[in-house]
Amino acid sequence: MNKKSFLLFDRSTQFNKGLRVIAVGMALLCIAAVSAQLATPPSQPEPSTGLYKKSLVSFKSHGVAAANPLAVEAGFAMLKRGGSAVDAAIATQLVLGLVEPQSSGIGGGAFALVHEGKTKKLRAYDGRETAPGAATPSRFIGSDGLPMKFHDAAVSGRSVGTPGTVALLAAMHKKHGKLPWNALFAPAIALAEQGFPVSPRLHDVVKLDRFLKDDPAARAYFFNEKGEAWPVGYALKNPAYAKTLRAIAANGPKAFYEGELADAMVNAVRDYADVAKRGDLTQTDLANYQVIERDPICFSYRLKKLCSMPAPSSGGVAIAQMLAAVERFPLSQWGANSIDSVHVLAEAGRLAYADRAQYLADPDFIDVPKGLLDPGYMKSRGTLIDMAKSMKRAEPGTPPGVKVARAPDANAFLTGTSHISIVDKFGNAVSMTTTIEDIFGARKMVRGFLLNNELTDFSMRFEENGKPVANRVQAGKRPRSTMAPTIVYDAKGNPEIVTGSPGGSAIANYVLKTLVGMIDWKLDPQAAIDLPNFGSRNGPTELEKGTALEALKAPLEARGHTVSVADFTSGLQALQRSFDAKGKAVGWRGGADPRREGIVIGE
Ligand code: DON
């Protein structure tokens, strides 16, 4: 087994973060942290908590990459027992909800691409949260008639959508599972009952969060009696989560969507002294929740076939559009971290994010133009890129087939989420991005898990100048996402790259960088993930702080870019097939994001 034990190092000169050492053990993780000095206010969905050096992991046939070592171990244990990639994804997710509760869990939603080795068919599963039946477009307009401030909306029952993750896991298991459903729950239940060591990142984000303490259940769980975050390495037990999981393991998703657990969620979203914060999720919303299987979006780039998540995510469309816009440029010649590469990829970002704001929303409510992916349209957008000068701000295009005049969603910059990449020995692959939206979601804990604030992914405004915003709130609708679980295929139709990332609206840019890193710059997955993050969401050109890219600030400004230098906390995981000199597939290699605590285990 090729297992990654790693030293966490800090780039303290650049990032002023503490030194930490993590050793990954087989059964239980031992974590020792030497210090954690953080100055970062959480200006992104999840704040930066330093860098953890990772190295490339090679393996032969099956492996798991995810954002926490204990979760990866749980998934890998299922593969070892003959389970499928989907079995492993379920076990991984259930442990993530315990050990990385700030990012994802059963109170949230997820999208997953599942490639079936036997049929070579790719399926896209939509387990996105939905707006309650009582939701109306003015949900996030305050009593003053103005759109609410992000955290006023997010940290409240109003932001909680009907969770989709449990239904998604069950739907995937029904179709692709090999091991019994209840067996997949064993690692998470054992860790929840016996206690798991609080990781450095969990400790840091609990300490940094301004809102978590306000919820009595979260306060009692995440903090000691003095109100301090549990120290790194503290064995934290979550018996309430174990009990919840035991119920779902024994009785299936019904135990979550109906009965006692459903009642507990419905009561929790109403449990606010401030009437304005009370939510309206009902037992009917929960009982009616449906996973939707959608057609993945597939497109070509440099002779490769890539597939990603369709609407209600905007991630796949944005990546397709950005790649099409830059295909005419010699990126491989320019190389990574070069001004020309950053210039064209940022410009492509402006164009794609302008279309995203204008057109992308739940396709069951809004006619999302198919023309957005029309090869001619996408190419024509690319011709707007001028090497000499930034366009600064792109206007949305007019893709073929546009029927309704809409106003753009001004939420473009509002932004916990996690990504899982798994391959098994049967040729199956899973790429799943899973979220509770903001860090710790709505900061509302019920029965050992946190409820999402996914509804703040809707536009706060529902119209502008009399024109409707595509991504406005509507009853039963799914908020637009940027999550982009992605699979790249080899010439034989087998998965070659399995990747994705959290990071709010910047996700498409993080995944784009990693794909271009592997495809154009011929980097291995770890090196591609390690590359500094950059891009544009149709605002400033964004460069990751403390990286080589800072040197491009002045030259980019000279080309007309407005540049913002900031932390960009992606959470990329990528698995890539390795080939011998004759082009024969000989195994896999994988990487995990140094900006988070993920690892890769394979054999
Ligand atoms: O669905 C989306 O695009 C967002 N709710 C994802 C949020 C996210 O990635 C937060 N991550 N750090």
Image (cartoon, grey):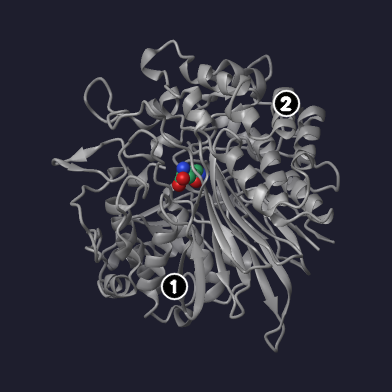
Q: Secondary structure at mark 2?
A: loop
Q: Quadrant of residue 346?
A: bottom left
Residue 258 in the figure: left or right of residue 32: left
Q: Which mark is residue 157?
A: none
Q: Give the farthest residue toward the left.
A: 465
**Where's the N terminus, which quadrant?**
bottom right
**Given the image, on which type of amino acid does mark 2 rest?**
Asn
**Given the image, on which type of amino acid does mark 1 rest?**
Ser
Q: Nearer the viewer, residue 259 or 381?
A: 259
Q: Nearer the viewer, residue 200 or 244?
A: 244
**Where's the C terminus, which quadrant?**
bottom right
- At a point 30% along the width and 65% down the height, the residue shown is 371
Q: Residue 286, relative to residue 409: is it above or below?
A: above
Residue 389 in the figure: left or right of residue 193: left
Q: Which residue is mark 1?
A: 338
The span from disc 1 to disc 2 (Cα, nearest Å) is: 48 Å
Q: Position of residue 42 (x, y in %)?
A: 48, 37
Q: Secondary structure at mark 1?
A: loop
Do we see residue 244 in this rendering? Answer: yes
- At a point 41% along the width and 33% down the height, the residue shown is 131
Q: Position of residue 190 (x, y in %)?
A: 81, 33
Q: Which residue is mark 2?
A: 238
Does the closest atom of ligand 1 sit within 8 Å of the Cβ of label 2? no
Q: Position of residue 299 (x, y in %)?
A: 44, 71
Between tags 1 and 2, which lies in front?
2
Q: Position of residue 581 (x, y in %)?
A: 70, 87
- At a point 30% along the width and 62% down the height, the residue shown is 351
First reached walking from the N terminus: tag 1 or tag 2: 2
Residue 360 in the figure: left or right of residue 260: left
